[in-house]
Image: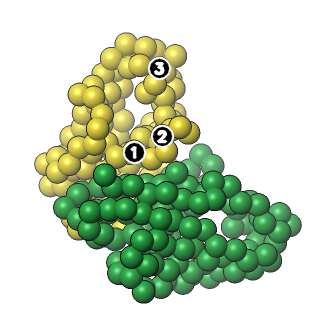
Amino acid sequence: KAGVTQTPRYLIKTRGQQVTLSCSPISGHRSVSWYQQTPGQGLQFLFEYFSETQRNKGNFPGRFSGRQFSNSRSEMNVSTLELGDSALYLCASMIGTGAYEQYFGPGTRLTVT
Amino acid sequence: EDQVTQSPEALRLQEGESSSLNCSYTVSGLRGLFWYRQDPGKGPEFLFTLYSAGEEKEKERLKATLTKKESFLHITAPKPEDSATYLCAVRPQGAQKLVFGQGTRLTINP
């Protein structure tokens, strides 16, 4: 059974640009969550989608947005990039809502210069 | 505010030297506590889910336990391949998210 896939794996962008990251969950999983991981802040929750609806959002500015498609694939977008947005962005899939385990992808390493 | 604190931040052991990692939490109703392992440059790998105080789960050299305020990850006779960062996370009641601790970086020397 294939795991969570994320593309691209590495990305270098310039301040002020925007970026779109993609996540394909495990087959049959309908919930997708996004997290930002930095050395200083650790893993922080961005948002969660289930059946194309955003169910919860973390404490991030409106520059961070996401969406989910009918096939459960998800994208997140960051507009007007700042240096502090450099991080590992992780996508996690879960079979449904509730206290199920989340399975993480390998992440997208974003570097903003 | 929901909070997870892991200790120690880093731990260095000799191969075969057993120890425990701690995860203490304050949460508005616990829907689940999760342990993950993360290797450098990779996403977290799921290890265990614990739901209620007194519950225990085991997998190879790892054993996770849960009380009302903390969880322990016991590592018995570790091997160098157990070296990784171990992350603890909680899912609060009514919240569709995981709240993570900062992790414990474990190094096992041969």
Residue for badge 3: A83
Write the residue at 23% across / 43% down: A57
Q: Is residue B99 above or below residue B47?
A: above
Question: Disc 1, disc 2: CB below 8 Å?
Answer: yes
Left or right, B63 with respect to B32, comes to: right
Amino acid under label 2?
A: Gln
Residue for badge 1: A44
Dot 1 or dot 3: first in sequence order is 1
Residue A27 seen in render: no
Write the residue at 37% across / 13% down: A16
Query: Looking at the rendering, which quadrant does residue A61 occupy?
Result: top left
Secondary structure of residue under mark 3: helix
Q: Colour of chain A?
A: yellow
Question: How many angstroms separate mark 1 from mark 3 (CA)?
Answer: 17 Å
> Are there few (<14), some (14-19), or many (20+) residues within 10 Å of tag 3?
few
Chain letter, colour green in render: B
Left or right, A52 with respect to A57, comes to: left
Residue for badge 2: A41
Q: In the picture, which quadrant includes the C terminus of chain B?
A: bottom right
Q: Where's residue B13, x and y in %?
A: 78, 66
